[in-house]
């Protein structure tokens, strides 16, 4: 009797833990209609990797030395490394042409997999996608650097997102909302824009930061920090550089 009570309390405790860790989070409190009926089944354990990294940096900054988000990510990572010399930082340059080009063949394989009509060749075709997702799972913390492009994000970052946001692999559909699977990892967004989209009506034109928060939130990144280098077309360069230095040092101390 005592044993069964202890056992059921233990089961209840575990269920409570899993409910909290993997709870569904409605996006911006919207009622949620799922986009997929099924899921992509992974061919192995996505958590198993050849090694963990402490920070994965998704870099969609301009490669020019003068890129503000580029300067900010370098300042942030240097400050972070000075505090955590033993931590591994992996940089993914999203402009690298060798990266997976996510195309309609991947989409076709995905749709066959979610509807349970896939063939062995679909798994093979999807293998590079799973590899990208494994790299994401291998990271304890994520940094995304992203200039604003046409109110939104550069297409290389969008392509990365299209690649890794997969039902069954990085999130699950539930009746109450999407449930991200990349939990307990802080995310730092480093963004910039020529104008200032932080106040008033300009906020309505910002399809960059709200989108990044929503889409990374969907796959589990709910602890979001943000460094916003605004008004780069109009602000004095010295002032921007001072802001970059102080905000990056402060963010690195708490990351
Ligand atoms: C293709 C392109 C589109 C852009 N679109 C916008 C925009 O819609 N709104 C804006 O304020 N700035 C826009 N900009 C300006 C950049 O966001 C700004 O110069 C930013 O500081 C550049 O990023 P970086 O210095 O961090 O590399 C655009 C720049 C480029 C190259």
Image (cartoon, rainbow, N blue to C red):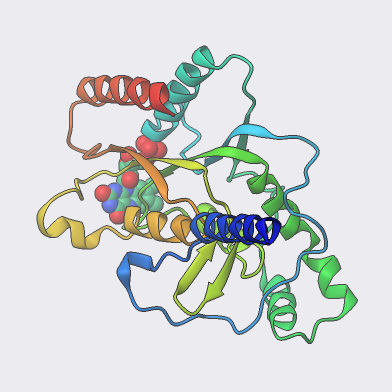
Residue projecting furthest to the front: 1
Q: Which of 223 and 57 is in front in this view?
A: 223
Q: How many marks do you count on the picture?
A: 0
Residue projecting furthest to the right: 120
Q: Is residue 243 left or right of residue 208?
A: left
Query: Which residue is at 50% across, 34% downward?
Result: 63
| Quadrant where the image shows the N terminus | bottom right
Q: Is residue 155 left or right of residue 194?
A: right
| Quadrant where the image shows the C terminus | top left
| Picture layout, residue 24 above or below residue 249 | below
Query: Which residue is at 12% across, 60% downward?
Result: 201
Q: Which of 78 and 17 is in front in this view?
A: 17
Q: Where is residue 4 in the image (x, y as percent from the top left)?
A: 68, 61
| Picture layout, residue 217 above or below residue 232 | below
| Picture layout, residue 105 above or below residue 19 | below
Query: Which residue is at 58% across, 45% downward?
Result: 95
Query: Which residue is at 36% across, 40% downward?
Result: 225
Q: In this view, does 39 lie to the left or right of 28?
A: right
Q: Position of residue 30 (x, y in %)?
A: 33, 74
Query: Which of the 4 image quarters holds residue 102?
Result: bottom right
Q: In this view, does 87 lie to the left or right of 120?
A: left
| Picture layout, residue 112 above or below residue 134 | below
Q: Where is residue 206 in the image (x, y as percent from the top left)?
A: 27, 57
Q: Where is residue 103 in the image (x, y as percent from the top left)?
A: 67, 68
């Amino acid at each position: 009797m005592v044993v069964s009570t202890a056992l059921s309390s233990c089961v209840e405790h575990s269920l409570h833990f899993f409910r909290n860790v993997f709870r569904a989070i409605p996006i911006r409190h919207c009622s949620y209609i799922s986009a997929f009926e099924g899921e992509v089944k992974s061919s192995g354990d996505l958590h198993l990797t050849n090694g963990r990294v402490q920070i994965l940096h998704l870099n969609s900054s301009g490669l020019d030395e003068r890129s503000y988000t580029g300067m900010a990510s370098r300042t942030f990572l240097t400050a972070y490394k000075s505090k955590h010399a033993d931590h591994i930082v992996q940089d993914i340059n999203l402009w690298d042409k060798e990266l997976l080009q996510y195309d309609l063949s991947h989409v076709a394989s995905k749709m066959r997999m979610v509807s349970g009509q896939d063939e062995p060749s679909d798994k093979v075709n999807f293998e590079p996608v799973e590899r990208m997702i494994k790299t994401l799972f291998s990271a304890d913390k994520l940094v995304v650097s992203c200039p604003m492009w046409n109110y939104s994000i550069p297409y290389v970052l969008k392509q990365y997102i299209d690649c890794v946001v997969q039902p069954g692999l990085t999130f699950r559909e539930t009746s109450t909302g999407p449930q991200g699977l990349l939990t307990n990892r802080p995310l730092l967004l480093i963004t910039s824009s020529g104008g200032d989209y932080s106040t008033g009506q300009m906020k309505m034109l910002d399809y960059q930061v709200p989108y990044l928060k929503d889409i990374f939130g969907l796959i589990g990144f709910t602890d979001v920090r943000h460094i916003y280098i605004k008004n780069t077309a109009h602000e004095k360069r010295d002032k921007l550089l001072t802001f970059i230095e102080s905000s990056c040092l402060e963010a690195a101390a708490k990351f």
